[in-house]
Image (spheres, rainbow, N blue to C red):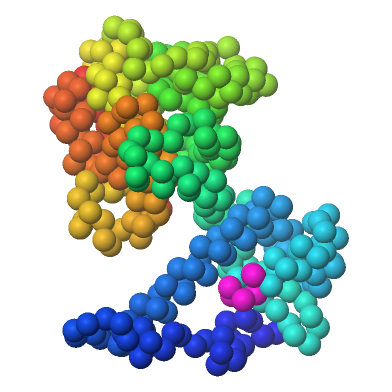
């Protein structure tokens, strides 16, 4: 079987813009070799961007899941197995073959998803499933023109302009919480697992659809859990799941977390990838500090990055993080006249904000093996 990356392509498909053309209208010293190399990089970027959309479709239609379980097959056989339209599947396969994601046997006209690729594309891959993230590309494209308007006029794009965002966030975080919350994330705080088993009061700030609260409530039935979020849809979903799981120790409220207004009520407060999105993160962190009892702990999961751009140059997710920030996190905050911290507010600013909120004890910053996306901040009152 010949794979797409081993087949010889014709010279036209591999040709780059002429170096003489590239530099023809530029005065002074011009490195044509460097220019041609950059032209090649731009073609890679263009292909990567478009293929991301096709990977997103493959994820949402379960094509990767189906192909990982069947032998090499024709487009008709794949479409039938996935219960999809053959013509669309065939064109999608063309993108997958030319992107070297799916192998193609020219003689038999059959397609095959290698196991090594399926390990990062299917739902069975769990935390290694990178196809999940490509769904955000299309979502961000929907607001591109609104973002361009912000470049000219300032302001931001409100959360309501991203109708699928919470759904995508729920899918992304659920797999992480299911696999790691109880066994890996909670134990990052020394001694907290034993306290949860005995029974303490816990608040999750910006709980979304409540997965984290429900998982902890099920794992620690003697503790009492509350989730706050401004989204009615999110809270309704959280309550529905808690009811399905027969949880009596998990409660959810629609609440603006800048107005928690509770004094020394909780032993543990969590915030999973939500603080940098807040319009008023400084105020939210102060509310969290006030709501903790003496000796209480704030566990904050947020993006693993530096506050300084030059220190993010070697971050493998650097371009993605700054893009997500521009297209969602920063602009949503600015839409509500917020601070606009953005996705890449970084470790230095995060620690400063925590100290500003009142956390005077040394702040611990930990990571979980295999998780390059997140830092876990542990701040004690």
Task: Indicate whether residue 98 is drawn in magenta.
Answer: yes
Task: Indicate whether residue 11 is drawn in magenta.
Answer: no
Point out residue 342 in the picture as x, y percentages from the top left corner. Answer: 32, 40
Which residue occupies the foreground of this view, 144 or 322? 144
User: Is residue 205 found left or right of 341 in the rendered image?
Assistant: right
Which residue occupies the foreground of this view, 160 or 97? 160
Report the label total: 0
- Say which residue appears at 21% left-offset and 28% top-offset: 354
Can residue 303 be seen here? The reply is: no
- Say which residue appears at 55% left-offset and 60% top-offset: 52
User: Is residue 203 found left or right of 133 in the rendered image?
Assistant: left
Tell me the quarter of the picture where residue 5 sits.
bottom right
Q: Split into 4 quadrants, where in the image is the C terminus?
A: top left
Which residue occupies the foreground of this view, 355 or 41? 41
Tell me the quarter of the picture where residue 214 sits.
top right
Q: Which residues are magenta?
A: 95-100
What secondary structure characterizes most of the magenta part?
helix
Point out residue 165 in the picture as x, y percentages from the top left corner. Answer: 53, 37
- Say which residue appears at 70% left-offset and 65% top-offset: 92
Residue 147 vs 359, above or below: the answer is: below
Point out residue 152 in the picture as x, y percentages from the top left corner. Answer: 34, 45
Which residue occupies the foreground of this view, 346 or 157? 157
- Say which residue appears at 27% left-offset and 41% top-offset: 345
Q: Split into 4 quadrants, where in the image is the N terminus?
A: bottom right
Point out residue 45 in the picture as x, y percentages from the top left corner. Answer: 45, 68
Residue 135 vs 45, above or below: the answer is: above
């Amino acid at each position: 079987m010949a794979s797409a990356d081993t087949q010889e392509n014709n010279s036209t498909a591999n040709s780059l813009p002429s170096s003489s053309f590239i530099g023809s209208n530029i005065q002074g010293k011009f490195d044509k070799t460097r220019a041609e190399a950059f032209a090649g990089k731009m073609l890679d970027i263009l292909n990567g961007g478009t293929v991301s959309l096709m990977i997103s479709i493959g994820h949402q239609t379960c094509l990767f899941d189906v192909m990982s379980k069947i032998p090499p097959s024709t487009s008709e056989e794949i479409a039938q197995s996935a219960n999809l339209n053959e013509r669309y599947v065939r064109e999608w396969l063309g993108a997958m073959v030319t992107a070297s994601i799916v192998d193609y046997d020219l003689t038999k006209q059959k397609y095959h998803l290698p196991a090594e690729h399926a390990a990062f594309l299917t739902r069975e891959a769990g935390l290694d499933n990178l196809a999940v993230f490509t769904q955000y590309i299309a979502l961000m494209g929907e607001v591109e023109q609104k973002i361009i308007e912000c470049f000219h006029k300032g302001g931001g794009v409100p959360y309501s302009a991203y109708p699928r965002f919470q759904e995508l966030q729920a899918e992304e975080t659920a797999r992480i919480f299911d696999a790691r919350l109880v066994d890996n994330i909670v134990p990052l705080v020394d001694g907290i697992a034993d306290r949860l088993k005995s029974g303490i009061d816990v608040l999750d700030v910006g709980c979304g659809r409540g997965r984290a609260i429900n998982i902890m409530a099920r794992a620690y039935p003697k503790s009492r859990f509350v989730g706050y979020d401004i989204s009615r849809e999110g809270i309704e979903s959280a309550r529905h799941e808690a009811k399905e799981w027969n949880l009596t120790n998990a409660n959810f409220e629609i609440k603006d977390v800048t107005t928690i207004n509770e004094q020394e009520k909780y032993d543990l407060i969590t915030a999973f990838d939500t603080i940098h999105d807040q319009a008023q993160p400084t105020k939210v962190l102060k509310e969290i500090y006030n709501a903790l009892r003496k000796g209480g702990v704030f566990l904050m999961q947020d993006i693993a990055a530096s506050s300084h751009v030059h220190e993010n140059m070697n971050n493998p997710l650097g371009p993605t993080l700054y893009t997500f920030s521009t297209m969602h996190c920063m602009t949503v905050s600015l839409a509500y006249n917020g601070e606009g911290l953005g996705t890449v507010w970084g470790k230095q600013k995060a620690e400063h904000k925590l100290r500003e909120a009142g956390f005077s004890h040394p702040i611990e910053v930990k990571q979980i093996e295999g998780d390059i996306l997140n830092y876990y901040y542990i701040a004690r009152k």
